[in-house]
Amino acid sequence: MKKSARVLVFLLAVAMLISGASLAESKTTVTIYTARDTNVIEYVKPLFETAYPQYELEVLNMGAQEILERVRAEKVNPQGDFLWGGTEAAFKLAAQEGLLSAYTPSFAADFPAAYKDPNDLWYGEILLPEVIMYNTEALTEADLPKDWDDLLGEAYKDAFIIRGVLASGTMRTIYSCMIYASGGSDPEQGYEWLRKFDANTKEYAQNPTDMYLKIARQEGTLSLWNLQDIMIQKIVNEQPFGYVIPESGVPILVDAVGIISGAKNEEGAKAFYEFLFTPEIKLALAENMYQIPAQGDIPADKLPQWIQDLELKAMDIDWSVIAENEMTWMTYWDENIKGKN
C-alpha cells in the first residue's frame, strides 16, 4: 500500500473514532430507579435505547422502600429521573410528599381510574398478584398449603425464607394486607397472625437473589412473593419454583411508574414513560417477562395464554388504609415481632 493510501486509511479510522466518540457524547443519560427483576431491566434497556438512540439508560436496582427513602433524601437535589415500579402505597406517599412530577401521558384518557393518580403523578404499569412460592423439588402437591392461614401450621415450621421486609415494597404490602385481612384497620389480630408466621420463618433474606438461592438449595422450601418474579425465575432462569394461589384471594398490587420531581432529564423520562406503555412493548413484556398490564387495552384473546389461564380472586383490601398505616404497622412488626417467636 502506498504511503498516501496508508495515511488516508489512518485518517478515516481517526475520523470514525472521533465520530463515534461524538455520538456517545451526544447521548443523554436517563437515570432510572427501579426494584424490577434484573431480567426485566436487561430486556427493556436495549429495546428502549434502540428506539431512542439519543438516550442512554442508567438503571439503579434496589428495593422499593430503599428507592422511596433515596428519593426523599435527594429531594433538594434530585439525582434520578424516573421511578420504574413500586407499590401504590409507596407512590401515594411519594405524591403526598411532593416527590413526583405531574405528567399526562398520551394514553391517559383511556386509562382505568383505579390504577392512576387523579393528578397524573403516577400511573400503574402492571398488576402483581402476591402468592405463595415453593420449591417444586422439595414439596409435592399434597404438601402444599391451600390458603394463608395454613402457613401458620406446625407442618411449616422453619419452612419459610422471607425477603427482608422493611426494604421491600412487595413484602411490606403483603404483611400489611395480612394485618388488614385479619382485623381491618385494627392491627392487633393481624399482629398475632404475623407472630405465628414469624415462628415458622427460618430466615429473612437480605435481597431477592439471596432468597432465591436459599430456596433453590432447600435451606427453606416456601416464601411469599409476587407472581411475575416467580415466573421469571421458573421459566427464564430454570429454577425449581412453583406457586400456590390462596383460595380466599390474593393481594393484587398496582406496580406504578412516575417522574421524579425536579428530574434533570425530564424529557428522557417522558420518552421512557411513553415507551413502557406502547401496546407492542406491553405485549412483549407480557409474553417474555410475565407482566400483567394494568391498562386493559389489549384484547383478552391477544394476551399470552398464561394470563388467560390465570384464575385470580382479589383479596378485598382498602388500599387507602394500607397506605395510611403501612409505616406504623411495619415499624411495630420490626420492633416487636420479627425474630421473637
Image (spheres, rainbow, N blue to C red):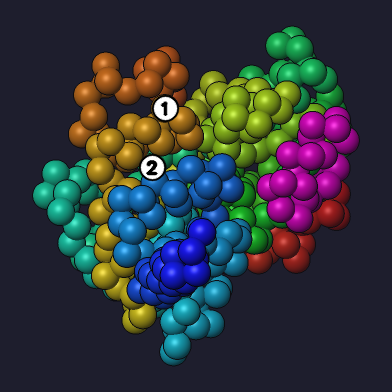
> Which residues make up the magenta segment?
201-219
Q: Position of residue 120 (x, y in %)?
A: 23, 63
Above or below: residue 35 compared with residue 283: below
Which circle, 2 or 1, is nearer the viewer? 1
Circle 1: residue type: Glu
Above or below: residue 166 compared with residue 18: above
Question: Depth check: 267 or 8 in front?
Answer: 8
In whole angstroms, how far apart are the C-alphas of marks 2 and 1?
Answer: 13 Å
Q: Quadrant of residue 154?
A: top right
Above or below: residue 77 compared with residue 41: below
Q: Which residue is mark 1?
A: 287
Residue sitting at the far front: 2
Residue 5 lies in the magenta stretch: no
Q: Which residue is mark 2?
A: 126
Residue 218 lies in the magenta stretch: yes
Tag 2 secondary structure: strand
Question: Depth check: 127 or 9 in front?
Answer: 9
Residue sitting at the far left: 109
Q: Decide if residue 341 is in sight here.
A: yes
Q: Quadrant of residue 118?
A: bottom left
- Classify residue 318 as left or right of residue 148: left
Q: Position of residue 85 (x, y in %)?
A: 45, 54
Tag 1 secondary structure: helix
